[in-house]
């Protein structure tokens, strides 16, 4: 099987997520060629083939030009599978490329199994196995789901020229508005998950955060239920954090949450289920009812 992996480049730099694509290809046991709209000065550490188009001409993003460039590389490489990261870049381009190729499109793949792709179902509670029925498939992989692989070496570069035209012009990036809570700078984060049960219990988790001199974080269901505001959310659709201490209270450990916090120096998880997946990344898993354990810990600290 052959894959064409669509790397990402931003603000003049190659994004590390490019190496997650190589991790995915490795798990698939597939040959890999990379594609990048970037520059000679930010090449991936990869000894294989790289189709490189100049960002100076195609812009760091332009759906018309980037789609055409991917299609040019597809024509040369004839891959079975074209793979994007499920990022704002990937989720915009992947369906355009799939429609142009009349290829199956599978979004947010979290694992490969039995020659198919596993994606989340029922808000991540279950997994569905998908096998594309077309000869070519266009895939997006969930950020953080595949271990990055950085093989080293210098790529064999095949340059792609920008031949299409577009009415769209890439102007640059605008910084997001300042967040009320900047979790990215916090050294300690104590996060509330669905396991807290109800809005009133947010104060129990917030009290522990305060006792530890940290910030309050949350998983997505807690934000969706409007128990806390979105600027507290940790994960792929929230903030990515790497505090010295991350305390996960009543959080199961879904991939989308882990992607946002697994780089924390020390992870303490409190969960009543000893088999909760958060246990796989936690340095310490306390198996307890958080409504008993958290207030007792807070009391010890104050
Ligand atoms: C496109 C997409 C993007 C997403 N982005 C994010 C994101 O950015 N961040 C995010 O968090 N999620 C995100 N999700 C949702 C994610 O898939 C999970 O559904 C979510 O993380 C689960 O949150 P949770 O762990 O709080 O809840 P659950 O999975 O319901 O887990 C609750 C946990 O609490 C435990 N528990 C229950 N009661 C107690 C108790 N009394 N004491 C101790 N433990 C208890 C349970 O054992 C369980 O492990 C996203 C999903 C999708 C599809």
Image: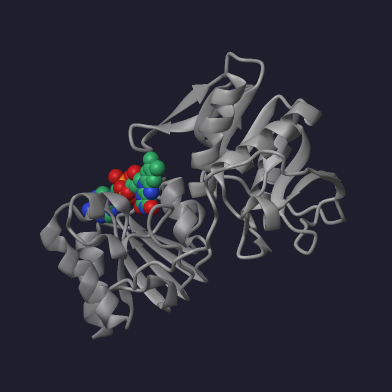
Q: Nearer the viewer, residue 269 or 85?
A: 85
Residue occupying image coordinates x 78% and y 43%: 160
Q: Nearer the viewer, residue 60 or 229?
A: 60
Q: Quadrant of residue 290?
A: bottom left
Residue at the farthest left position: 200
Residue occupying image coordinates x 34% and y 53%: 251
In the rendered view, tell whether residue 25 sits above or below residue 159.
above
Q: Quadrant of residue 97?
A: top right
Residue 296 position in % (x across, y down) = 22, 72
Residue at the farthest top position: 133
Residue 91 position in % (x across, y down) = 49, 40
Number of on-image labels = 0
Residue 127 position in % (x across, y down) = 44, 30
Observer able to see residue 94: yes
Horizontal side of 128 relative to 170 (left or right) equals: left
Residue occupying image coordinates x 36% and y 36%: 125
Residue 176 position in % (x across, y down) = 39, 66
Horizontal side of 252 relative to 90 (left or right) equals: left
Q: Nearer the viewer, residue 24 or 107?
A: 107
In the rendered view, tell whether residue 70 sits above or below residue 16.
above
Quadrant of the rendering where the C terminus is positioned: bottom left
Q: Nearer the viewer, residue 263 or 279?
A: 263
Quadrant of the rendering where the N terminus is positioned: top right
Observer able to see residue 29: no
Horizontal side of 149 relative to 258 (left or right) equals: right
């Amino acid at each position: 099987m052959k894959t064409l992996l669509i790397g990402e480049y931003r603000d003049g730099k190659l994004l590390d997520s490019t190496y997650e694509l190589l991790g995915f290809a490795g798990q698939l046991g597939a040959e890999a060629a990379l594609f990048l709209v970037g520059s000679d000065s930010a090449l991936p550490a990869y000894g294989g083939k790289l189709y490189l188009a100049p960002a100076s001409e195609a812009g760091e993003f332009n759906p018309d030009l980037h789609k055409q460039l991917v299609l040019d590389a597809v024509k040369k490489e004839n891959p079975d599978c074209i793979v994007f990261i499920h990022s704002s870049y990937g989720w915009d381009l992947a369906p355009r490329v799939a429609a142009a190729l009349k290829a199956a499109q599978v979004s947010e793949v979290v694992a490969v199994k039995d020659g198919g792709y596993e994606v989340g179902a029922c808000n991540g509670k279950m997994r569905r196995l998908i096998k594309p029925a077309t000869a070519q498939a266009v895939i997006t992989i969930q950020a953080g789901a595949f271990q990055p692989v950085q093989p080293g070496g210098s790529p064999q570069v095949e340059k792609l020229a920008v031949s299409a035209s577009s009415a769209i012009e890439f102007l640059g990036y605008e910084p997001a508005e300042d967040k009320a809570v900047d979790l990215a700078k916090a050294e300690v984060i104590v996060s509330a998950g669905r396991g807290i049960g109800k809005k009133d219990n947010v104060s129990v988790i917030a009290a522990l955060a305060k006792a530890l001199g940290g910030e309050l974080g949350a998983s997505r269901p807690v934000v969706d239920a409007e128990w806390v505001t979105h600027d507290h959310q940790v994960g792929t659709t929230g903030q990515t954090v790497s505090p010295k201490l991350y305390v996960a209270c009543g959080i199961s450990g879904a991939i989308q949450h882990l992607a946002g916090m697994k780089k924390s120096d020390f992870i303490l998880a409190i969960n009543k289920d000893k088999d909760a997946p958060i246990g796989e990344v936690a340095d310490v898993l306390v198996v307890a009812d958080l409504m008993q354990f958290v207030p007792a810990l807070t009391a010890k600290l104050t």
